[in-house]
Amino acid sequence: MTTPVLRRVVRRETHSPRTVAMFVAVVLLILALAYIGLEIVLSLAAQPALLLGPAAAGGWLVGLPTAQPAGLVIAGSVVLALIGLVFIVLAITPGRLSKHTLEAGDRAVVVDNGVIASALAQHVSEETGLARENVTVGVGHRSVDITVRPGAGIPLEASAVKSAAEAQLQNYRLGTAVRTRVRIERPTETEDEL
């Protein structure tokens, strides 16, 4: 991935836009501004306020630091600060789609995590000699979880499964390194984990 255009395309394919969060924020802002505008118009027309008129709202805001009970004011401030923090985090951090990039020389290959999980499960099934339905693989952005369920009395080491899976992942040449975790669930014995 040498060209800036290619890097930009890969980023668009692997990261989700913040459209939903932005839509919610804009709708909330429009509703708040519409309510404030309605209260101002009602005040100018000498009509009763729906909830709180501009003069009463201004007086309430000025008196808020000395309002009682202070615990309620602090709790409300903390809630507003947390909502603001959520919006800041959503604005700054990139969203992730369940996809990985594979290194293929000067070409970009974007693969869904489900495809990687299915291929890896098939490989582990072939390497261990177990039926495909006894191997479950989950692929995340930074980790791969493999659960193997051998039948009773079938010897299987977690380290062997892990090394086979890691060798296959090396062949895939993922753009980001992943951590492999293997669990062996035996029907009558305790669970092995590596």
Image: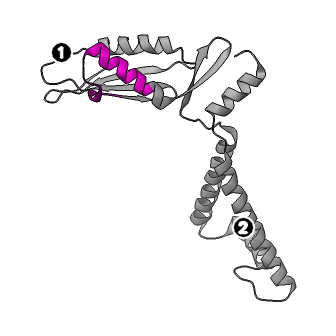
Q: Which residue is mark 2?
A: 31
The numbered mark at residue 189 is: none
* The quadrant where residue 109 appears: top right
**Secondary element type, mark 1:** loop
Q: Position of residue 188 (x, y in %)?
A: 13, 29
Q: Which residue is mark 1?
A: 155
Q: Residue at x 84, y 89 (%)?
A: 46
Q: Is residue 133 left or right of residue 104?
A: left
Nearest the viewer among 160 and 83 is: 160
- Above or below residue 83? Residue 138 is above
Q: Position of residue 102 (x, y in %)?
A: 57, 19
Which amino acid, by three-letter code, is at mark 1?
A: Pro
Q: CA distance from mark 1 to mark 2?
A: 63 Å
Q: Is residue 170 left or right of residue 101?
A: left
**Secondary element type, mark 2:** helix
Q: Residue at x 68, y 13 (%)?
A: 106
